[in-house]
Image (tube, rainbow, N blue to C red):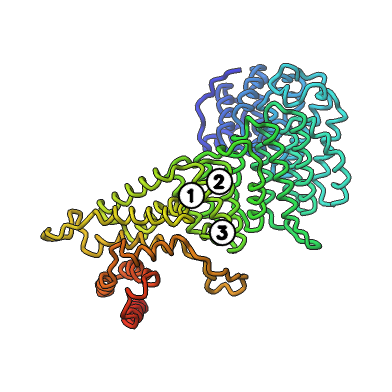
Amino acid sequence: MELDIPCQLETDEIQELSSHLKTSSNISVERLEEVAFSYLNSDAGKQEIKLISRILGLIESQDPSFFQRYLNVFLDQIKDPVFGVHFLCTFSNAIFTDFKSEIVSTEFWRLVQSSLTHDCSLTRKRGLYLAKRFTDDLQSFPVQNSPVENLFGDGFSKNKKIWEDYFLILECLEEKQVHIIQQILNRLQILQDFDASWGAIVFGRFFVHQNVIVVRWGVEQFFNYVHAKTSSNANQIDQCLLDSIVHQLLETLNLTKLYTKEEGEHSGQTLAIQLSDCLNKLLATYKEQQTLIINSLVEGISRVSWGPLPLLWITDALVKLQCSSDDLLSEKCVDLILNLVEHHIVYQEPVLRGAAQQNLLNCIISTTKLSSTNNLERVLYTFWSKKVIFVNTAIWDKVENYISEHHNVDNMIAEVKQKMSSLSKNELLPSNLLEKSVISSLIPSLIVASKNPQMMTKIISEIISTINDQKPNENRLYSSNRINKNYEESLRLKYQCLKAIKDIFAFPEKRKGKLYLKFTETPEISSVGVTTLKNIIADKAIALDIQECLSITRYLMAAETVDSIGIVDVYISLFDILPVEFIKGKLFIVLLVAKLLNKLID
């Protein structure tokens, strides 16, 4: 029933009128209605219930139809279950007797169901009272063809016994003793006959129980519940069931106390297998909704502030997912994963963090094609900078196959040359941004060519040639070229590219200060990238002058600025890949570096 709500009163006006109402009832009905509706637009609490009762009683004596109008507006507007179920319990006699059509509304049961999972125990008891009172006389309520027909099922809505079992489960979950809750575990099978929202309420209480044993039981039973619900409905996934997984379950699996090691077996491995089996069951049953399931799962993972151990096993489950398509993950979800890797797990234990990051990269590779080169560069740079991707590893080979399968190498090389040309023509970027731009642009094509010396030679030569084509105009009066770059700045991009190639193919080194971490020395394996770069320099296919490097280094050291110290590293880092005959004054280079370090310390 539609009703125009009178203008909202301010809080102080309500308090003033409320105090006046306690001493006098000689107030107009219109004014009383205005006060009653104002409580729906303010933070009314339990202390106002008595006042609302008196107001409604006064109005009812002159306008018997007002309460129904007020109840409809109340159900439509009130979202707070604490105040909502308190009000409904206060007027339950009148509501359950004269307003049964309002009881079978979605708004009524939204309040009741939200109260059953509320943190306040009194609110949960009030919600349970309303639900019990409804099921005590099921046949008198017009559930069939009502908005909540699906909520209460078809045949079992009139089965009082099954509801008694359901309420028994909720009441037992209020107890702290484990042996009491253990006795109702065999009754949980009835939940597969209920709407998924009722199952979410029960498992929501399991997941927040103060005893970790009960929480673990809840997680195990939830996986069984999902398997049963999935088998009973093969048409379309229940959104409430999916929400239970991506919200309630993931938050619960983030509890570190769930992950223990007993008799050499880690419980995290068991949970990861159970989770992957559960998700694969959903993916196999609802094949047309795999995109929805995968993206909802990734969005749910990105919303949780993960501990290192839970994240490791959750991402391990992601790797085990069996999808019918390799293009399910949206660009938004890829961004969420990158944001998680770059900003939210940087302070975690390094070994666990690295394993989780590799799992996330495997998830991206197996569920999306990354058809855009820019997206591919962004993903590869993020995981390369986090030391997840490095040469001569299984993940490097997997990325190489992935790029070759979904991207045209010649087009990638053309795009890299275009970007290098644009960087050389435009205004010079700050050193850190320039380094990131160069590495991001180079890494896809270099990974693809990492096992092909001929392709590697072609890529490096063409890129450096493109940069060399942008020669400075030395005849200008005030600067080396039209965008005001000095001599060093006009050459920086070339040397930055050479350093980027060296860095991309660098082998991992032992972390400084992390003596407690196990580090296995890998045999020195020849890297095609670095070897090719050395050969190109030795054959003088690239115009690289050692004296030029030294002159630039002296110039930067003389500048004595913080930025110049970072820039000079670009040039000094190239000395170890130069052929021996290129470096005649090794002692001079050592002294040069020492002098630079002294300036940094000063």
Q: Residue at x 56, y 30 (%)?
A: 38
Residue that carries the numbered disc 1 in the rendered image: 379
Which of discs 3 and 1 lies nearer the camera? The answer is: 3
Q: Image check: 361 left or right of 222?
A: left
In the depicted structure, whether residue 162 falls above or below residue 101: below
Amino acid type indicated by mark 1: Val
Residue at figure coordinates x 23%, y 54% from the top left = 470
Looking at the figure, which quarter contains the C terminus?
bottom left
Instruction: Determine which of the numbered discs, if any, sits on residue 364 in the image.
Output: 2
Q: Position of residue 272 (x, y in %)?
A: 71, 50
Relative to the observer, which residue lies in front, 255 or 369? 369
Residue 602 visible to the viewer: no
Cβ atoms at labels 1 and 2 below 8 Å apart: yes
Q: Position of residue 170 (x, y in %)?
A: 80, 40
| Camera-nearest label, 3 or 2 | 3
Foreground of the two, 596 or 560: 596
Q: Secondary structure at mark 3?
A: loop
Q: Residues within 10 Å of mark 3 (few under 14, many from 20)?
A: few
In this view, the residue in front, 226 or 540, is 540
Q: Residue at x 79, y 43 (%)?
A: 221
Query: Nearer the N terminus, badge 1 or badge 2?
Result: 2
Q: In the image, residue 308 lies at what x, y percent? A: 62, 58
Q: Decide if residue 491 is in sight here.
A: yes
CA distance separating discs 1 and 2: 9 Å
Looking at the picture, which amino acid does disc 2 mark?
Ile
